[in-house]
Image (tube, rainbow, N blue to C red):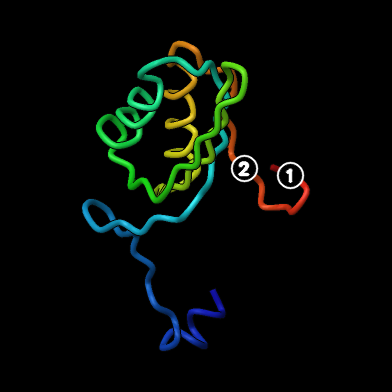
Amino acid sequence: SQLISRYGYRIVKARWKEGPGMSSFPVEIKIIGEDRPGILNDINDIISKKMKIALRSMNYESIDGTFTAHVRLMVLDTRHLNMLIGQIQKIKGIFTVRRKDFYPDNT
């Protein structure tokens, strides 16, 4: 193309980083489910052991047998995030799992 012929000295070939040390981005998910013994362990096992995702923080609140958790994590990309959400949704007692939008009125 003309750009390459005219400005080839300014073009740098992009390479995608793969394997250990891949860059990741922060995301928060909101999980709602039945507050039963061991459910936090089940969630943590999926995040840390099965998906090998860096957990940054978890805020957990239980009211009348239902819990709400806000979980901050580091994921590789949206595909990775969607895989995680799918795995958490399979846990017995989970009602909803979704990415949390960062708007003041959306909790």
N-terminal label among 1 and 2: 2
Judge whether 41 appears above or below 105 on screen: above
Percent of width and height locating residue 54: 33, 47
Splitting the image into 4 quarters, where does residue 37 fall? top left
Residue extending farthest top: 92
Q: Amino acid at mark 1?
A: Asn
SS category of the residue bearing label 2: loop
Label 1: how many Cα within 10 Å (few below 14, some 14–19, many 20+):
few
Label 2: how many Cα within 10 Å (few below 14, some 14–19, many 20+):
some
Q: Which mark is residue 93?
A: none
Seen from the viewer's position, the closer of residues 92 and 14 is 92
Percent of width and height locating residue 107: 69, 42
The residue under label 2 is 100
Question: The N terminus appears in which quarter of the rendering?
Answer: bottom right
The residue under label 1 is 106
Judge whether 1 appears above or below 34 on screen: below
Q: Residue at x 58, y 20 (%)?
A: 66
Splitting the image into 4 quarters, where does residue 49 fall? top left
Q: CA distance from mark 1 to mark 2?
A: 8 Å
